[in-house]
Image (spheres, grey):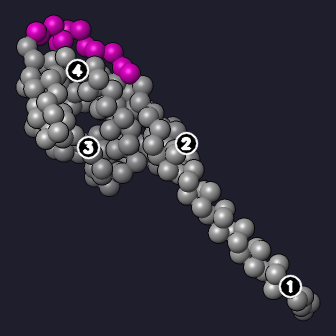
């Protein structure tokens, strides 16, 4: 066995470089999470012909949404790839009355998680005010929620009267 003595100053410098690297990586993570990865979808013209509108009070102000059906895409990062989903919400009186999510999984594991998310999302969002909609985990799928929430933000912009 060969044993080498590493000077104390080299060990200290290596430790400092490692800690600095962790701070740099932590800073990168926060910037990536803050990015808006939503893609604006199209409004379903068959359902948006309704001229009624609604308003909800989220506590900080009043937002008015036009009743109708809206579609948007949202993407999110997984350990393997960037995934996307398509979200369609039907809104009446500022409340979600119907939801449809379509996945396009790129990885085998993503197919499982998107399937679980799609199976459980209606229980989480139908009957919830659009301004209060913020999904964090559905049926064990937490990353898919990021894409869903990005799509919801785009839908809020589309539905704002």
Evaluate whether residue 108 shows in this view: no
Q: In terms of secondary structure, where does tag 1 sit?
A: loop
Query: How much space separates mark 2 and mark 1, taking CA atoms?
Result: 40 Å
Residue 49 covered by magenta stretch: yes
* 85 relative to 157, above or below: below
Q: Nearer the viewer, mark 2 or mark 3?
A: 3
User: What range is drawn magenta here?
Assistant: 40-51
* 123 relative to 50, above or below: below
Q: Which mark is residue 159?
A: 4
Query: How much space separates mark 2 and mark 3, taking CA atoms?
Result: 23 Å
* 8 relative to 147, above or below: below
Looking at the image, is mark 1 or mark 4 earlier in the sequence?
1
Q: Are marks 1 and 3 in contact (CB under 8 Å)?
A: no
Q: In terms of secondary structure, where does tag 3 sit?
A: loop
Q: In terms of secondary structure, where does tag 4 sit?
A: helix
Query: How much space separates mark 1 and mark 4, taking CA atoms?
Result: 64 Å
Which residue is the site of mark 3?
Answer: 134
Relative to residue 82, is residue 101 drawn left or right?
left
Which residue is the site of mark 2?
Answer: 81
Question: Which residue: 10% across, 26% down?
Answer: 55
At label 3, counting other C-alpha atoms closer than 10 Å, the crowd grade (few under 14, some 14-19, many 20 or more) is some
Which residue is the site of mark 1?
Answer: 6
Most foreground residue, 115 or 40: 40
């Amino acid at each position: 066995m060969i044993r080498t003595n590493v000077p104390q100053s080299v060990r200290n410098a290596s430790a400092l470089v490692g800690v600095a690297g962790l701070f740099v990586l932590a800073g990168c993570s926060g910037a990536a999470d803050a990015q808006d990865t939503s893609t604006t979808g199209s409004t379903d013209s068959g359902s948006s012909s309704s001229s009624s509108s609604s308003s909800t009070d989220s506590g900080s102000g009043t937002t008015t949404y036009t009743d109708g059906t809206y579609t948007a895409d949202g993407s999110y990062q997984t350990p393997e790839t960037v995934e996307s989903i398509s979200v369609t919400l039907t809104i009446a009186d500022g409340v979600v009355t119907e939801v449809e999510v379509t996945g396009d999984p790129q990885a085998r594991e993503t197919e499982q998680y998107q399937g679980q998310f799609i199976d459980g999302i209606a229980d989480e969002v139908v009957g919830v005010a659009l301004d209060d909609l913020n999904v964090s985990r559905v049926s064990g799928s937490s990353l898919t929620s990021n894409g869903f929430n990005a799509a919801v933000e785009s839908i809020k912009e589309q539905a704002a009267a």
